[in-house]
Amino acid sequence: MDPTLLDRLLLAGHLLREDTARAFAGTPLTESRAAVLWVLQAQGPSTQQHVARALQVSARNISGLVDALEPLGYLRRTPHPQDRRAVLLELTPLGVETMATMAREHAQLDSDLRASVAPEDREAFGRGLEAVVATLGRLVAEAAR
């Protein structure tokens, strides 16, 4: 029996998780911890509430991740300049360096994957992948209601 589109997507997801686990092996980072760092890299210093909304998780979840990342030296809490009750999360030099490395590795993997598709097929592949992602997003949102 030939693999279905879903079979191939599940395999791709599995392989991406394996690659992520390999990349984090020997480090204190996890996918969840790295997600916090990605938000801070992309958006700059942010409140925990902002990071929680960006990652669609609870503020309590972010607190636990920040509590783990801060003593490891990836980020720091600083006073919010306009709200004395809030704190800002910002990357430390180690966090900036780590994210620069991750961004380079991300770009290389993207380039490798893009190169695996014939140039004449890339536009159609991209449109098809966008359609699949949109459909999965819609189905997940409907199931959550």
Image (tube, grey):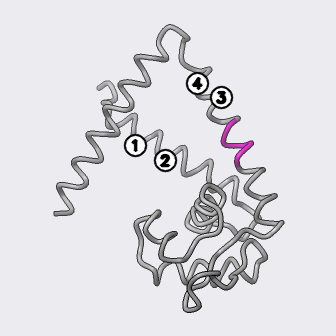
Query: Between disc 1 and disc 4, whose residue precedes?
Result: 1
Residue indicated by mark 2:
14
Task: Give residue 88's position: percent from left, percent from top.
Answer: 63, 78
Task: Give residue 79's position: percent from left, percent from top.
Answer: 67, 85
Mark 1 crowd level (few <14, some 14–19, many ≥20, 10 Å Cα): few
Are discs 3 and 4 less than 8 Å apart at CB? yes
Q: Is residue 23 above or below residue 7?
A: below
Q: Which residues are magenta?
A: 103-107
- Disc 2 to disc 4, C-alpha distance: 19 Å
Using residue 100 as the reference point, say whether residue 80 is left or right of it.
left
Residue indicated by mark 4:
114
Instruction: Look at the numbered disc 3 and give the secondary structure of its residue.
Output: helix
- Disc 3 to disc 2, C-alpha distance: 20 Å
Asked if the stretch drawn in magenta spans residue 53, the answer is no
Instruction: Look at the numbered disc 1 and give the secondary structure of its residue.
Output: helix
Are discs 1 and 2 less than 8 Å apart at CB? yes
- Disc 1 to disc 4, C-alpha distance: 19 Å
* Residue farthest bottom in this picture: 85
Are discs 1 and 4 less than 8 Å apart at CB? no
Query: For this rendering, which residue is in front, 125 or 16?
Result: 125
